[in-house]
Amino acid sequence: MFSLLRPYIFSLDPEVAHDLAIKSLKLNVIPKSFFQVNGEEILETKLFKKKLKNPIGLAAGFDKSAEVYNSLFKLGFGFVEVGTITPRRQSGNPKPRIFRLEKDKAMINRLGFNNDGMEVVSDRLEKRLPEDFLGINIGPNKDTNDKILDFIKCFNQLNKLASYITVNISSPNTEGLRDFHGEKLLSNLLSKLTKIKKNKKIQCPIVLKISPDIEEKEISNINELILKFKIDGIILSNTTNQHRENLSDYKKNEAGGLSGAPLQTISLKLIKNFYKSNKGRVPIIGVGGVDSGQNAFEKITAGSTAIQLYTSMIYNGPGVVKRIKEQLVEILKKEKIKNVQEAIGINS
């Protein structure tokens, strides 16, 4: 179905096509059974001590304001992450702000955390409780005077509705956000969030989403802080505003974050480095260029407990999740691996 519709979808502006996808998912007519695969039990895993049907998740950025998460679960995802959510509603950066790089199977976006704000989102989630494992990605408003306070506001408001909270310090489209990769700022942020978590006896796991553009020497410093403050997980990684030199599409120099196929090797290297640095003590969610069972397997064997995708669904349609699951089941059986958890980090 998607292959027939794709020429029409790709004739539309990317943001118009995205809005159309959200509206379609709101109809909630897709049968869950359509996206199940034979032998899927081999993909059952655990993340933050909770059972997942499979380790394949949808990355933040698609369901920005938590409108269609329950419909997305039906597509076969083991978990879904919504957001990025900010304290106040914001419209994001001026349009056009999403660009398809078809020759590179990639996207560039400079959306700028457009979302409905934490009050609207929390009300939406309370009215329609998540039917499965839901992550909520949080960030600061563009015009805030205190980014840390914005993170705290969102954490306090949304933690009861989430299976985990992602602290997004990695988007290239919010000025000054990536400064939080520095030791002093990151220590201050994590200290305050974990103190609130402890004092209020909040059980919700905290996950840190990290930029792919950090220097290798920064990995050990970030890891030390993750271990020091007992952060529950790491997402590796977000979009990159670098690595354009080998791209073919004429839109490659648009400002914003690059996602899709070109991120596969970049994120894979980062996963291996972080896994070695923290010796597998902190679960990693691997993101970037996942569009097949093979590169999902590569990310898992590099050290990812779970993986996420987004851009590959834009290019391949919702059936990509089912295809990845089928291929991953086949690979695990071929490798004589009885459960996907046994594959974590074996090639790191």
Image (tube, rainbow, N blue to C red):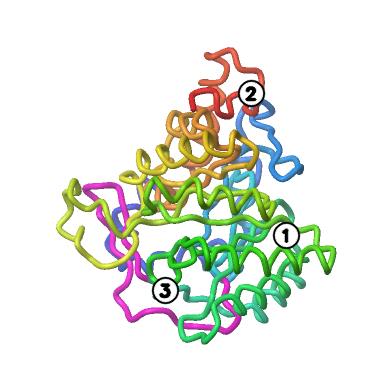
- Which dot, 1 or 3, sits closer to the camera? 3
Quickly name the residue at label 2.
342
Residue 102 inside the magenta-drawn segment: yes
Q: Position of residue 62 (x, y in %)?
A: 49, 61
Count the labels in the image. 3
Question: Measured along the vertical axis of the image, is residue 170 above or below residue 333?
Answer: below
Quickly name the residue at label 3.
176
First to last magenta residue range:
85-110
Secondary structure of the residue carrying numbered label 2: helix
Image position of 85 (left or right of 192): left
Mark seen at residue 130: 1
Mark seen at residue 212: none
- Which dot, 2 or 3, sits closer to the camera? 3
Q: Position of residue 196 (x, y in %)?
A: 76, 69
Residue drawn where x is 21% and y is 48% of the image: 103
Q: Are marks 1 and 3 in contact (CB under 8 Å)?
A: no
Q: Are marks 2 and 3 in contact (CB under 8 Å)?
A: no
Label 1 to label 3, Cα distance in Å? 32 Å
Viewer-side residue, 287 vs 318: 287
